[in-house]
Amino acid sequence: MLNPDASRGFTLVEVVVALAIVAIGMLAVFKTIGDTINNISTLRDRSFAAWIADNQITEVRLSGEMPSVDETAGDLEFAGRRWHWVAKVPQTPVDRLRRIDVRVRREGDAEDSSLVSLAGFIGATATSTGPSPTPWNTGQADGGGDGEP
């Protein structure tokens, strides 16, 4: 024979409290998921902006000419988005050395809200096109022999 107290179920108050605890837990999970999605989007955009800034510095280095002390800007499309970059070349204490500061932002963002600011340097020796006197460029293994290793 069954004991009438043993088959007793949950009361309405217990069920409501349990559902409230589950709901609060689910809200925390959904907030964490939303924050993660926002962080992924921001990190993706910062990565793209860093690549664009690095590409601008590399283009100046590959041009073979010393950049003039100036500020240039441009727009481009990259990864399905429009981007705006600004490159500043300030005067440095060393005549044959230039610093290049590149800032990148999404097109439409505020002008002072760059996602990435990247600096690079270029020297006069990096832009020269003459042969290098280094042993690995002259074909000599030890810097002075007959060219045989």
Image: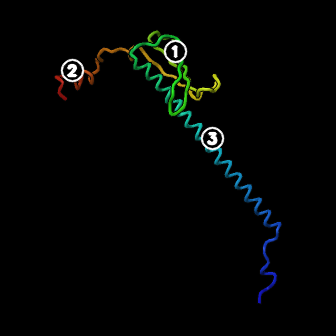
> Would you identify the image quadrant in which residue 126 lies?
top left
Q: Pinpoint residue 87: horizontal percent, then vertical percent.
A: 53, 18
Q: Amino acid at mark 3?
A: Asn
Viewer-nearest residue: 37 or 107: 107
Cβ atoms under marks 1 and 2 closer than 8 Å: no
Rendered position, 99 above or below 36: above
| Horizontal side of residue 124 vs 26, given as left or right | left
> Residue, x 27% and y 24% (percent of image)?
136
Q: Amino acid at mark 1?
A: Val
Q: Pinpoint residue 55: horizontal percent, then vertical percent.
A: 46, 26
> Tag 2's secondary structure?
loop
Rendered position, 81 above or below 38: above
> Residue, x 47% and y 23% (percent of image)?
56
Q: Pinpoint residue 86: horizontal percent, then vertical percent.
A: 55, 20
The residue wearing badge 3 is 38
Rendered position, 14 above or below 34: below
